[in-house]
Image (tube, helix red, strand yellow):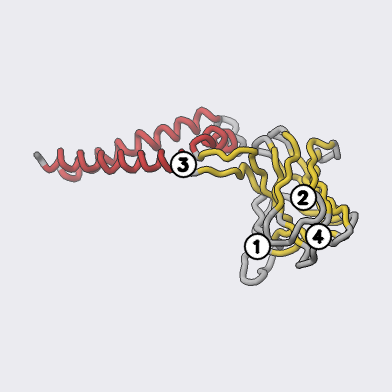
């Protein structure tokens, strides 16, 4: 067997194993987070007394919203308060809402609240209301400086407590009702990417680029390998 043929067979074998591994991982790896506001839960940026509300706005929805997950605590006090989560338009029209029953324990775990289905491709405000009687602390990050060695995370929205903007942004995750594989999210990824484009770019171009990455790039690498041996 010539060296060129052996090299080509070896290259194709490695390529096939790599693509197969990528496909298997894409099918087996499952998650439920569809979108976040890009803020880490580092610090209790929004203390909420009974009757207070914090809103993060505006947030552009890249996908349908079903559940809102947020990090909240009571700084160790027992029996967390009842809380309401509301999704509204910038003008205040309610699009979805959910509730957290009182008596929860502050064990460092986030709350996930079903708010119904809110359609994508619109800007919304996500508000968390403390119904009391215990004070609650919604976690997020600060816009500048550092805290305990952590770098701040940037956000394109702002947080307001009772209408007044605060220094930090709260952490929000938007999750699906069912876990999904990575490969199931590929069409949604390309659809989301199409929002951030020049006018002449559409979803078709992203599909073409994906096909080129999977087909054209390996072809060019194999050709370069054979030419180097020659």
User: Mark 3 or mark 1: which is in front?
Assistant: 3
**Label 1 secondary element:** loop
Q: Quadrant of the C terminus?
A: top left
Measure the alpha-carbon separation of dots 3 and 2. 34 Å
List the residue tagged with mark 1: 152
Looking at the image, tell me whether mark 4 or mark 2 is earlier in sequence order: 2
Q: Is residue 154 visible?
A: no
Q: Residues within 10 Å of mark 4 (few under 14, many from 20)?
A: some
Q: CA distance from mark 4 to mark 2?
A: 25 Å
Q: Which mark is residue 28?
A: 3
State if disc 1 and disc 2 touch (CB < 8 Å). no
**Quadrant location, the N terminus:** top left
**Where is mark 4, residue-wise?**
79
Q: Position of residue 54 (x, y in %)?
A: 82, 53
Where is residue 170? Give x, y as percent: 73, 55
- Callout 4 touching callout 1 (CB < 8 Å): no
Q: Which residue is mark 2?
A: 56
């Amino acid at each position: 067997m010539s060296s060129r043929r052996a090299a080509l067979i070896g290259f194709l074998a490695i390529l096939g194993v790599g693509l197969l591994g990528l496909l298997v991982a894409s099918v087996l790896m499952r998650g439920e987070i569809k979108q976040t506001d890009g803020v880490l839960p580092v610090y209790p940026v929004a203390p909420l007394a009974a009757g207070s509300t914090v809103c993060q706005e505006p947030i552009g929805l890249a996908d349908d919203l079903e559940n809102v997950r947020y990090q909240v605590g009571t700084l160790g006090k027992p029996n967390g308060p009842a809380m309401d989560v509301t999704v509204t338009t910038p003008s205040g029209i309610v699009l979805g809402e959910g509730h957290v029953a009182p008596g929860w324990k502050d064990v460092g775990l986030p709350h996930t609240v079903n708010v119904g289905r809110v359609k994508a491709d619109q800007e919304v405000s996500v508000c968390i209301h403390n119904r009391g009687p215990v004070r609650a602390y919604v976690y997020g990050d600060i816009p500048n400086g550092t805290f305990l060695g952590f770098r701040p995370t940037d956000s394109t929205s702002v947080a307001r407590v009772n209408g007044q903007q605060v220094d930090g942004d709260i952490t929000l995750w938007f999750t699906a009702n069912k876990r999904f594989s990575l490969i199931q999210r590929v069409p949604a990824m390309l659809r989301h990417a199409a929002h951030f484009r020049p006018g002449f770019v559409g979803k078709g171009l992203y599909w073409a680029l994906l096909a080129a990455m999977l087909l054209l790039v390996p072809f060019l690498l194999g050709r370069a390998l054979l030419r180097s041996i020659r």
